[in-house]
């Protein structure tokens, strides 16, 4: 049987989203502030000249305290400016590396700054700084993990969407035709909130890593960190419709997921909703079902055979509804 791919526009060529820009700005400014604040706020417990380089386990290089605070922040801002220029000059080539580079470099510099403060803490001379050991390996591993997670979060799968006839509630599909539709939506304010909550939890971790305090309020750190992750996973959604039904992925990694087979769907429709009508932003539970609401406007509403609704505020909702109804007709499920 002939297997055809429905035509459409690739989604991988879309411009950089405002959400990514806002998240990058918050991350850049937050990391810069931490790099400067870590040593300067511990000035009374650090020597005027601090060790900044080690040969083996012994320090062999130093900087004045103020320079040691400002130098990594300057390097960090230069990296950010370089990425901004690269995105301006060659956006198609640079877009995929911006997130991983910012994540890797930010974690690497913040970890190194915390280790430097810890090694110099309560020393009278920089030559007496504590040796560097396993913390170097941990910092490199954390930076690599951050870069890998950023790459997974920002990569975009190129796919094609199925065409829809204007005004038709059901897409006309030929027998054996492969139908694919992909769309996504995000709320940049929720993503900024997730970044802010995450940055609030970072100082406690860095203070403990730098040795400046042994009484970190870990309850607050965990609460802000958990809040950041929760908001992040409720701030974006990826929706895919194939012959297997509806696939919905939440958050930057597309996890967790929800899947509805065509046999589970009664019909799909489009409704225009506001945040007030949906009960707020993010993942919502209401009397008729559940949903994820990220922006006002057209929403894909999937009515299941169990009588519940699954509402998703996503771009191109009309086309998605038409394709789902075509799949329901194909498997012989009654549309009601």
Image: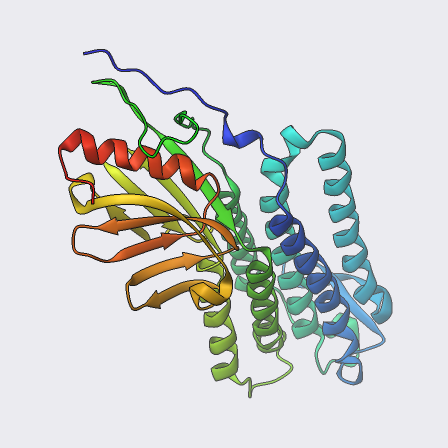
Identify which residue is drawn at 74% across, 46% down.
79
**Up-down relation of residue 244 to residue 299 (above or below):** above
Q: Nearer the viewer, residue 268 or 223?
A: 268
Residue 279 can be seen in this image: yes
Total tally of numbered discs in the picture: 0
The residue shown at (61%, 38%) is 97
6 w.r.t. 121: above or below: above
Tell me which corner region of the image, top left, top right, bottom left or bottom right, holds residue 161: top left
Q: Position of residue 2 (x, y in %)?
A: 23, 11
Where is residue 312 drawn, in percent x and y? 40, 51
Q: Residue 320 in the image: x percent, y percent?
A: 37, 37
Q: Considering the image in quadrants, where does the N terminus appear?
A: top left
Q: Residue at x 81, y 78 (%)?
A: 47
Q: Residue furthest left?
A: 332
| Left or right placement of residue 27 versus residue 289 in this view | right
Locate the C terminus and report the quarter of the image it occupies.
top left
Work out whether 235 lies above or below 69.
above
Report the side of 17 relative to 124 (left or right). Answer: left
């Amino acid at each position: 049987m002939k297997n055809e791919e429905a035509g459409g526009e690739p989604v991988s060529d879309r411009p950089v989203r405002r959400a990514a820009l806002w998240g990058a700005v918050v991350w850049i400014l937050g990391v810069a502030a931490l790099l400067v604040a870590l040593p300067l706020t511990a000035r009374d417990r650090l020597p005027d000249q601090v060790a900044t380089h080690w040969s083996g386990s012994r320090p062999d290089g130093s900087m004045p305290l103020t320079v040691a605070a400002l130098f990594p922040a300057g390097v960090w801002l230069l990296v950010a400016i370089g990425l901004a220029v690269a995105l301006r000059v060659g956006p198609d080539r640079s877009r995929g590396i911006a997130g991983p580079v910012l994540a890797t470099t930010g974690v690497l510099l913040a970890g190194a700054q915390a280790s430097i403060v810890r090694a110099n803490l309560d020393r009278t001379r920089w030559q007496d700084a504590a040796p560097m050991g396993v913390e170097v390996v941990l910092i490199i591993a954390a930076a690599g993990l951050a870069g890998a997670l950023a790459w997974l979060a920002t990569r975009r799968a190129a796919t094609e969407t199925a065409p829809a006839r204007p005004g038709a509630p059901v897409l006309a599909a030929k027998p054996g035709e492969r139908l694919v539709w992909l769309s996504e939506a995000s709320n940049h304010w929720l993503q900024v909130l997730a970044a802010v909550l995450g940055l609030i939890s970072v100082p406690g971790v860095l203070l403990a890593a730098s040795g400046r305090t042994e009484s970190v309020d870990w309850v607050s750190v965990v609460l802000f960190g958990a809040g950041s992750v929760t908001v992040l996973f409720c701030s974006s959604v990826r929706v895919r419709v194939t012959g297997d039904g509806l696939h919905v992925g939440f958050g930057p990694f597309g996890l967790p997921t929800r899947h509805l087979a065509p046999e589970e769907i009664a019909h799909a429709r489009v409704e225009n909703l506001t945040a007030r009508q949906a009960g707020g932003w993010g993942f919502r539970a209401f009397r008729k079902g559940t949903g994820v609401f990220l922006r006002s406007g057209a929403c894909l509403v999937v009515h299941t055979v169990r009588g519940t609704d699954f509402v998703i505020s996503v771009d191109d909702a009309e086309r998605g509804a038409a394709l789902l109804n075509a799949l329901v007709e194909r498997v012989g499920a009654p549309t009601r």
